[in-house]
Image: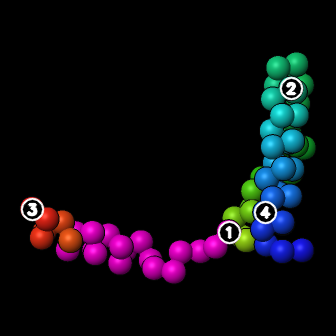
Amino acid sequence: MTTYNLMKKLYREIDRLNEEIDMRIERGLSYKVLARRHKYLMEELRSIDPQPIVSRGIMNRLAQYVSVFLV
């Protein structure tokens, strides 16, 4: 399975879980098991999301450097 298809499948499952959690909240039922599943799926999704190549610190310094010349 490609990364794109895996991400698509995870997003669909998360959306389905969100709808079911919303329904349980409206009915006043427990959604503890569903919340755990949602958390697990979100962790899986974050683990396959591409990580930034350039660190945030470098980007902040670059932005400060550029802003000096724009002023």
Q: As displayed, is residue 71 above or below residue 48?
A: above
Q: Is 58 positioned to the left or the right of 30 in the image? A: left
Whether residues under marks 3 and 1 lie with C-beta atoms below 8 angstroms apart, the answer is no
- x and y percentages locating residue 10 in the rendered image: 83, 57
Residue 41: tell me if it is visible: no
- Provide the residue designation for mark 3: 71
Lower position in the chain sequence, tag 4 or tag 2? 4
- Residue shown at 79% from the left, 72% from the top: 3
How many neighbours does mark 1 have within 10 angstroms: few (below 14), some (14-19), or many (20 or more)?
A: few
How many neighbours does mark 2 have within 10 angstroms: few (below 14), some (14-19), or many (20 or more)?
A: few
Q: Is 66 positioned to the left or the right of 43 in the image? A: left
- Provide the residue designation for mark 1: 49
Whether residues under marks 1 and 4 lie with C-beta atoms below 8 angstroms apart, the answer is yes
Three-letter amino acid code at the position of disc 3: Val
- Provide the residue designation for mark 4: 7
- Mark number for residue 4? none
**Mark 4 and mark 3: Cα distance apart in space:** 42 Å
- Provide the residue designation for mark 2: 23
Q: As displayed, is residue 52 above or below residue 27?
A: below
Secondary element under disc 2, as helix, strand or loop, is: helix
